[in-house]
Amino acid sequence: MARKRSKRAAKMSAAKSKRRGKARAAPTEAKPKGVINAWEQDPGDGAQPTGGQVIQRPVPVLREQPFSIRIANPASAPQAKPHSPGTGDFRYWTAAEALRRGADFWGALLPGTSWEVGSILPVDLDFGIDLNAFYDRQGLKFFHGLAAGRTVFSGESPDVVCHELGHAVLDSLKPQLFDAASIEVAAFHESFGDMARFYRRFSCRAYAREYWRRPAESFAALRGCHGWRNSSAGPSGNRFLPQSRPTACAMR
């Protein structure tokens, strides 16, 4: 997936780009009780969206520091409980869990850093019909589209979610890279996003244990994106399609 330039982003003042002070404190919220269901890796491939292992995770609090996040669409969160894969409620919470886990990882490494877009990063989980996802200095935008005979949602993939989150993190750290007229810089932005999704996977202890138990097979699976094929789609981003052979996936 990709970062997407906009006229609004190009007109941002230098003063805003230099804003690197303490992140504004988010409202304090009580920790919710209970758990939600989420994908450990990614949705499945072909006509079988098994997604591998469904895991139960604590209910994520997106507005927590570090790196506060707000899901703007849907406007309200579904009930925080284990939902079945294939439902809109499940897609909401698996995206929220990936966003919070990714934000916690980067926040521990970059204390005091705030988003380039402001104190809270807006996220739209269904911005329209397209096989795409991007960060555009207004927030993260995900889409849905028909592929391999079924409707897929880019925001349901923890890999895609954390890749786009990686763009937002790098922009908050090095905003001068966002509009740099260099293909090498653009490639670095994409590789940073890919590394961000790897780190999210290794933050899952069960996945990390399995990786070190069978490193060769696990690395091949990482390169295979676990059933999602990314293919370059030009400056507007990368497209993705369900792939029947996970190891045939090409990572961009």
Image: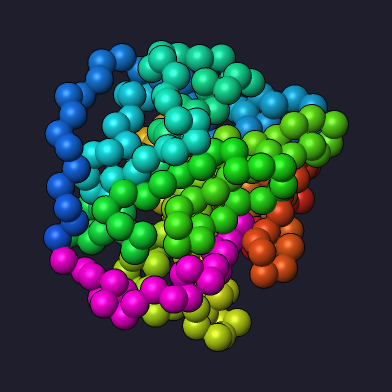
- For the point 62% across and 29% down, which residue is it? 51
Q: Which residues are magenta?
A: 1-21
Quadrant in the picture for residue 20: bottom left
Q: Nearer the viewer, residue 66 or 49?
A: 66
Using residue 8 as the reference point, say whether residue 243 is left or right of it: right
98 with respect to 151 (left or right): left
Q: Is residue 244 visible?
A: no
Q: Residue at x 58, y 23 (%)?
A: 88
From the top left corner, tell me how far across and down residue 171 is, in percent: 39, 67
Report the number of numbered marks: 0
Q: Residue at the spot x=20%, y=24% of the render?
A: 31
Image quarter where the C terminus lies is bottom right
User: Residue sitting at 32 percent across and 37 percent down?
Assistant: 62
Residue furthest toward the right? 149
134 within the magenta span? no
Look at the image and say whether residue 12 sits in the magenta stretch.
Answer: yes
Residue 143 visible here: yes
Could you tell me residue 132's position as x and y percent?
Answer: 66, 51
Q: Is residue 67 above or below residue 20?
A: above
Vertical order, 252 against 32 (above or below): below
